Image (cartoon, helix red, strand yellow):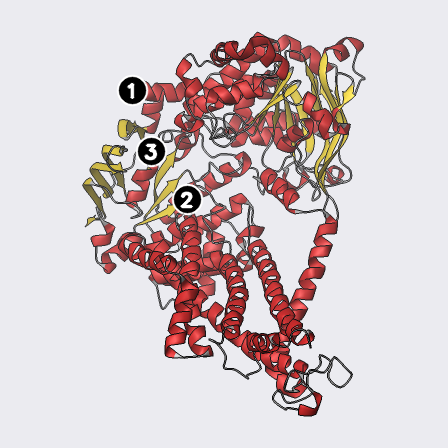
Amino acid sequence: MTDSVLSAEGLRSAPRGRRQRGSLLIGASLFIVGGLAVLAVFGPLIRPDPPNAQDVTNILASPSSEHWLGTDELGRDVLSRLITGARTALAGPLIVAFGSMVLGTTLGLLAGYRGGTVDAVIMRGVDLAWAVPQLLIVIVIVGAVGGGYWLAVGLLTFFFTPGTIRIARGATLEQAPRPYVEAARVLGVPDIKIMFLHIWPNIAAISLANTFLAFATALVSLSALSFLGLGAPVGTPDWGVMLAEARRVLFENPIGVLAPAAAIVITATSMNLVGDWVYERISARGAVR
Amino acid sequence: MKPPTAATQDDRVLDVRSLRVEHTRPEGNATIVRSMRLAVAAGETIGIVGESGSGKSLTARALTGLLAPGLVAEGEALYMGRNLLTLREREWRSVRGREIGMIMQDPFTTLNPVFRCGRIIAESLTREQADRVGRKGMREETVRRLREVGISDERVIDRYPFQLSGGMRQRVGIAAALARDPRILIADEPSTALDVSTQREILNLLRAVQEARGMSLILITHDLRVAFSTCDRVYVLYAGSLVEVASARELDAEPLHPYSHGLLLSEPPVDRRIQEMVAIPGFVPTADEVAGCCPFAPRCQWAQPQCREAQPALRAVAPSRVSACIRIEEIRGEMAALRKTAQKPAPAPRARSAPSTLIDVRDARKVFGSGKHQMEALKGVSLRVGENESVGIVGESGSGKTTLARTLVGLESVDAGEILIDGIDARAWSRLSRRDRQRLRRVVQMVFQDPYSSLNAMRSIGATLSEAITTHQPRAKNLSAQVRELLTSVGLSPTYAERRPATLSGGERQRVAIARALAVQPRILVCDEPVSALDVSVQAQILNLFATLRESRGLGYLFITHDLSVVRQVVDRIYVMYRGEIVEAGEVDEVLARPSDAYTIKLLQASPGASRESASEQKSEAFVSSE
C-alpha cells in the first residue's frame, strides 16, 4: 500500500523547472482574474473618463498620455470603455458558469446516483440538447425575440447545462459504488445527504474545474453574440460590441480592435489556467492514493 | 560480519550491498530503504518479507531499474561484475527480462488486454530467439512456453487475457517473464491477488520452474508462511532496514529478532484456535521516523534505552544466523517461552445455549446479468445467525459470499427465497417502510474490506461518526461525548475526531470504520474481509478488537473471508461456500478438523502453513554462514 503511494507521489513530482514556470503562469493568471474582478466592481471609480463621453475633436487618436489606449471613432476613451466592459464581461459568464454548474451538478448527481428511470429521463434530455446546433438556436431565438444580453445569458446557461450533467454523472457513477457511499447507505443516511454531503465534495474538483472552463467558453460565446449584434446593444461599452464597432476603422486605429480582442483572449486563457490550478489543489486535498 | 569466502562469492549471481532508496522531495529527501543487503546464488530461492512500507517492493524495483521518477537508489548491486544501480536506461534494456525478469502482483493489469496471450509471449522473446524459431516455429515455441508454466491447453494462445482466470493469467505472465530465459526472476507478491487454492499452485509452479531451469528466484511477500513454504532463505525487512536473515526452516523454528517473532505470532495458525492473538502494538513507522535507533524499538516490548541510542548493525548471533537485535542473547529465552504459551490451543469455546435466531436466510437465489450472460451468484443459500453468535462464511472470489453479505444489509436484493432479520421480512428493502428499514439498520451493520475507501476522504473522523449517530438519533445530546466514547471503545484516542482519513494508517481507519458501524448500536456486524487489506501485525489487533467487542457489547458477527486461519480464531460456526452454494456447514473446529466436502479439503490443503515442505536446507545454511 505505502509502496504504491510512494511511487505515485514520485510520478507526480514533475521536474522542478516545469513546476516553477507553471506557478509563475498561475500567479499571473490569478492576478489577471483578481484584477478584472476589481475592475468589474470598482470600475466607475478607477476609469479616467466616463465611457460614453464623446470628444469629436479627437477621434481615432493613437495612444497618448491623455488616452492610454487612444480613442474610438466617436472620440471615446478606449481604456475607460474597456474597464467599464469588465463588468458585463464577467457578470454574464459568471451567471452562465455558476448557473449551469448548480443545475448540471444537481441533475448529474441525481442521474448517476439514482440510476434507472431517473437517469434515463435526464440523459435523454441531455442527448436531445446535444443533438441540436446550440449557437444557431441561440442566434435564431435572440434574433426573433430581439432580446439582447440577458436573454443570451439565459439561453447559454440552458445549453451549457447538459455538458455539466454528463460530467457530474460520470464522476458520480465512479463514486457511487465506493465503500464510503455504501457505508452511508447501510447506516441509513438519506439519499439527499449522500448525494450532496458525501459524493459532491468528492467530485467538487472536477465540477469546479469545469465551471472555470464553462466561464471561459461563455465569455467567448457572449462576446461573439455581441459582435454579431445579438448580445449587448450597439453603443454599450461591451468588449464584443467594441470589437464589432472598431472593426470598421481597423486600419486607421488598430488598437481599438486589438485592445478588446486581447482582453477577451487573456481573460479566457487566465480562467482556464486558474481552473486547472483549482482542480489540482482540490483533488490533492484529502486524496489518499 | 565475516567477509564472504571466495568459494561462495563465485556462487553469487547477485550481490547487493548497502542499497539505499530515497524519495527526493523539495522539502527534503525521505528515506525508504535505509540499508539493504542480500545475496543470491545460482539456483537459490530467497524471500524478502516485510509489511507495507518496509521497502521490499522498491528494493525489487531498484534491482530492475523500474523506480518511479523522484526515487533514487544508491549503493551497490553487483550482477556479473556490473553495478546495476549505475546503469542507464539504454543499458537496462539488455539486462531487464534477459538477465533479470520480473513478475508483478496483479495479473489483472499486467497483461495488455488488447493482445492475445500468444502474442504477449512471442513479443517478450528477443529478436535472436524469434529469428531462430522463425515465423512458422513461433506458434510451436509459444505452446512450449505455455506448457512450461503448466498450461497444456493450446487454445490459450488465441485467448485474450480477460478470458482467462486469475491463476491462468498469472501463468501467462510468468511465461512472458521467462521468455528471455533470465538468470534471476523477481516475483513481487505473485500470489497475493489470487484465490487461496490458486496461490499454492502458482507458488509451486514458480518453485518447479526455478529448479528445472536452475534459475535464481527472489520472492517478495508480506506473508511469512508463503516465504517459509517456498524459499531457502528469508530476509526480514522492517521500515526500510534489514532486521534478520535466516534459513526458512530456522526462522520458522525460532525467530531471533523481536519483529520476526511478533510477525510470526500475529499470524493465526490454521490448525488450532488460540486464546488471544499476540498483536504488535502500533503500526509500521516510516524509515525516517526511526532513524538513529533500532527501527522496531517503539513497538518492542523488550526495548531498552540502549536500543534507542544507535541503529544496531546486523551481526551473527548464532551459527548461520544474522540479526539486528542487540539484546537477542538476553531475551532469546523469554521470546521462546512467549511463543510457546501464545501458541497453546485455547479450550474449545464454551457451549452457548442455543441463541435466539437474528438472521434467517432460506433458499436465497440471485442472478446477475440478463439474456445470455447470466451469472448465478446465489443458488439457494440458507443460513442462520443467532444473537451474540459469530458465524463465518468461507469461500474464494466468485463464491457468492460477498453478494450474500450485501443482501443482508440492503445493498442488493435477492430474486427468490426468504430473508428474515429480527422477524422483519428483509427480502426487498426498497419495499419496506422507512421505520422498518431504520429498525433493520439497528440490527445489522457492515464493515467493509478496504479501509482506504470506506471512509469519506473529505470529512473528518468526528464528522463521519457524528453523522452515523444523528442518523438514528436526530436529537442526540452530547454528540461530541458520544464520538469520544466510540473512539475509545475501538482503541483510538479521542483526539482522532479532528483528523482526516488521509492522516491515518490502515489499521486506524478500519477501527474508525468499526466505530461508525457501532454508532447505531447494531446487534450483528457483517464483516466483509475486514482484515485482508491490513498488515499482518495490525490484523491481529483488529481481530482481538472484534473479540473484545463481542464480549463487551454482546455483538454477533457474520465474518466473510477467504482466510481459514483468520476464521478459525473468531467464529463459532462456519459455512463453506463454493460457486453460489453452501457445500459444508458446522462448528468451526469440527469442520476444519474433519472436512467432508472435497472443496473444503482442497481449501485447507491450499492454505499456506498447513503443510510446510521444507526447502532444500543444506545449500542455504552454507550460504548464510558466509555472510
Which label sits in the foreground, 2 or 3?
Answer: 2
Q: Residue B473: horizontal and vertical position, in percent?
A: 35, 64
Pointer 2 indicates a residue of which chain? B
Q: Earlier in the sequence, mark 1 or mark 2?
A: 2
**Image vertical order of residue B318 relative to residue B366, above or below:** above
**Image vertical order of residue A230 relative to residue A287, above or below:** below
Mark 3: few, some, or many residues within 10 Å (few <14, many ≥20)? many
Kind of residue indicated by mark 3: Ile
Residue drawn at x 70%, y 53% as measured from the top left: A19
What number is the disc on residue B117?
A: none
Residue drawn at x 47%, y 64% as measured from the top left: B480
Quadrant placement of the C terminus of chain B:
top right
- Which residue does the numbered mark 1 point to in the structure image? B597
Q: Nearer the viewer, residue B25 or A156?
A: A156
Q: Earlier in the sequence, mark 2 or mark 3?
A: 3
Mark 1: few, some, or many residues within 10 Å (few <14, many ≥20)? few
Quadrant placement of the N terminus of chain B:
top right
Q: Earlier in the sequence, mark 3 or mark 1?
A: 3
Q: Is residue B328 left or right of residue B349?
A: right
Q: Residue B575 occupies which quadrant of the picture?
A: top left
- Which residue does the numbered mark 2 point to in the structure image? B448
What number is the disc on residue B393?
A: 3
Q: In the structure shown, which secondary structural element does the residue marked by tag 3 occupy?
A: strand
Q: Is residue B431 left or right of residue B345?
A: left
Q: Nearer the viewer, residue A255 or A84?
A: A255
Residue drawn at x 58%, y 14% as measured from the top left: B130
Kind of residue indicated by mark 1: Asp
